Image (tube, rainbow, N blue to C red):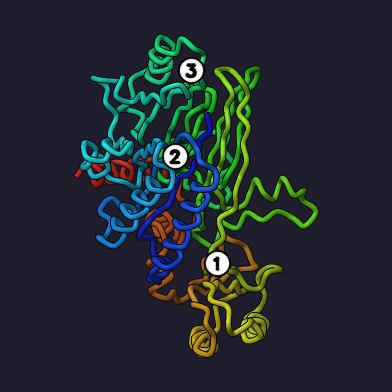
Amino acid sequence: MKILHTSDWHLGHTLYNYDRKEEQQDMLQQIIDITRKEQPDAFLLSGDVYDIPQPSASAQQLFSECMAQLHKAVPGMRIIVTAGNHDSGMRTEAFQSLLSMVDIHTIGTLDKEHPQNHIIELPGKGFVIALPYASDRNIPEGFHAMLGDLVAERNTKGLPVVMMAHTTVRSADFRGHDQKFDNIIGGIEGVDISAFGDGYDYLALGHIHRPQTFTIKDCERLARYSGTPIATSFDEDYREPSDSTDSEKRELCHSVSIVEIGQRSELPQVRTIEIKNIHPLVTLPTDGPRPWDDVKTRFDAYPSNLQTYIRLNVAITDSLPSRAYSEAQEIAKAKACKLCQINAIRTEDAHATTHRTMELSEFQQMNPLDILKQFYRAKKGVELPEDLEKMFNEAVQELNEESRES
């Protein structure tokens, strides 16, 4: 069985209020072209199709047109899409009856009453156990293992088995994400890889944006986060030092994963195919934060024809110079790039209480927990206690669940 594994498209995502439709269209076209060339048996999209549960009409059109082009590119391919924590489960399944007629299967909610609905067979090729995002309290104990057992009963020819899931695995590398609390990423608390049982050969994961592979100890199984096809934040820069091997660089690039499995209990073979971003996210200076006058000189020398997003990292000891934003905006006027943020990085104690003025665009990009942490630090002079942080994360997760369900 040959599959294309991807996840975390975040269609409709904006970056500092800049619309990203053009680069997302190009991303999807690259994925369609790769699919046409590779001719997989199954196309797996492991959650976070959209950036928000109520996506715009434009974002939904991007998705529907992509699905149509994928079906046209490989008519015999089975397309399986599961909902992530950013998606509405009900919206994901809204047109399932119609889409299934052209071999497109959308799984938005956990069906505990009819678990067999999560099992999709590829006749003569293998099985896919398609699981959408669900909070821990909604997943019955042993549910994954039970699905593996159901497949085993049907899998009399020893065909490959793939499981899809959208969650946080505790042993994952979370770099590129704002780590809110130990093993809680994006409001999802981490689970051990053993929670998925042993009824699969390849676990197609979504949610963590950094691409990475787990080899399951003492068996011929793999689990992999395919990662984001294009970065959703400046911190999703996974380039390793220049002495990294070519294989390490390929592993960490924004990409889709091509997975081939010969038969049940045979180690899957994984290749990555890079997705290029026509409008890359660039942080200046590239060698770390510098004082404003140095950063301004480097930004002024930045090529004027490059259509990139720019973040400026400025080292400060007190506060950002009041002229910095106006000077940066003036420089940006003569360039094709889009100035997103001046990131003031204090070179003193990180707990210093000196205040600085924050631009509205910077405040809008902060997550609620970071705002709470800054407020608590300013008012109390200490860090937010871990128990309060955990309670806050749980409250945010409940609100996100209500938003998805509505």
CA distance separating discs 1 and 3: 39 Å
Nearer to me, 258 or 75: 75
At horizontal 72% and vertical 45% (from top left) the residue drawn is 247
The kind of residue on which mark 1 rests is Leu
Residue 261: image location, x then y, percent = 57, 27
The kind of residue on which mark 2 rests is Phe
Q: Judge depth for marks 1 and 2 and give the one in front.
A: 2
CA distance separating discs 1 and 2: 28 Å
The C terminus appears in which quarter of the rendering?
top left
Secondary structure of residue under mark 3: loop
Q: Is residue 210 above or below residue 313?
A: above
Label 1 vs 2, first from the N-terminus: 2
* Mark 3, residue position: 199
Residue 237: image location, x then y, percent = 60, 58
Q: Is residue 54 left or right of residue 306?
A: left
Q: Is residue 72 above or below residue 276?
A: above
Label 1 vs 3, first from the N-terminus: 3
Secondary structure of residue under mark 1: strand
* Mark 1, residue position: 281
Q: Work out whether residue 387 can be spotted.
A: no
* Mark 2, residue position: 43
At horizontal 43% and vertical 17% (from top left) the residue drawn is 148
At horizontal 57% and vertical 45% (from top left) the residue drawn is 211
Q: Is residue 147 left or right of residue 344?
A: left
Is there CB contact under 8 Å for labels 1 and 2? no
The kind of residue on which mark 3 rests is Gly
Secondary structure of residue under mark 2: strand
Label 3 vs 2, first from the N-terminus: 2
CA distance separating discs 3 and 2: 20 Å
